Image (cartoon, rainbow, N blue to C red):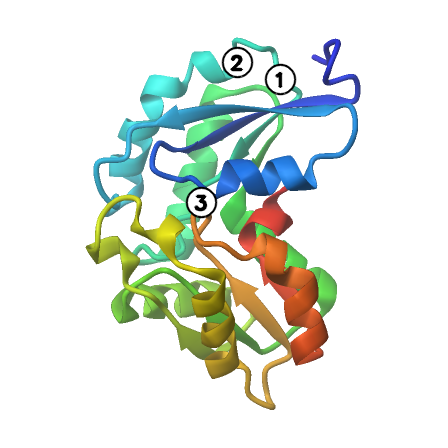
Amino acid sequence: MTDAFGYRAVFSVLLPATNAVMEPDMAALRPHDVTNQSYRFPFPGLPGDVKDLSQLMESTQEIVLACEPDRIVVAYSPEYMSDGVNAASQLRRFFEERFEIPFTLASDAVSEALKALGATQVGIVTPFLPEANRNVSSYFAAHGIPVVGEAGFSSAQKGRAYTARISEAEVREAFERVDTPEVEALVQVGTALVCARLVDALEAHHGKPVVAVNSATY
């Protein structure tokens, strides 16, 4: 339900306790008369599967509804998991079974954005290790979007809040590495990795669409 400040909409945003990037990204993207109410779930380490992830999220099931939001925004995507397509489906079912209001998943948002752009070959930048990047590539390939270049930062191995410490300069350099002539669009996944604020400059520099997960989700 709307309220005095969220005259147009109130969003409950569900995100990991260690994610220090998604909230300021969405604050910058927020339209007038829309409010973002953030609810954080414990994040002791990178979940290996959706069962582990859903157990972490369960503590927030009641409080995300306390402000009577119009939509739940899930600021976490499981593309890095083995069989990411199935993992995303499981996460979607988790929310369908527990909530009657609309919700948005970050994992759905990026692939839908790329389909809207008509991009068929992409280069991706992630905060993940090579093995997880291969899972991300498989996820997009399953949606008919081949990944022809990838770059990661292995942040999952360096501490829970490390991803948010990766600099804008490092992200720009990673995009330089994945941008090849066959790439039609550049993509960033990992909601704790800085990118949304760089999109305009990256598109001007590379001459190609850039889909940042936080922008697409919001």
Can you see residue 147? yes
Q: Residue at x 46, y 20 (%)?
A: 98
Q: Identify residue for label 2.
A: 65
State the separation of the CA atoms marked 1 and 2.
6 Å
Q: Which mark is residue 69?
A: 1
Q: Identify residue for label 3.
A: 89
Compared to 25, does 198 lie above or below?
below
Q: Position of residue 107 (x, y in %)?
A: 50, 50
Between circles 2 and 3, the one closer to the viewer is 2
Q: Residue at x 62, y 35 (%)?
A: 27
Q: Locate residue 78 relative to residue 185 in the image: left or right.
A: left
Q: Are marks 1 and 2 in contact (CB under 8 Å)?
A: yes
The quadrant holding residue 53 is top left
Q: Locate residue 23 relative to residue 116 in the image: left or right.
A: left
Q: Locate residue 208 relative to residue 53 in the image: left or right.
A: right
The residue at the far bottom in this view is 181
Q: Position of residue 69 (x, y in %)?
A: 62, 17
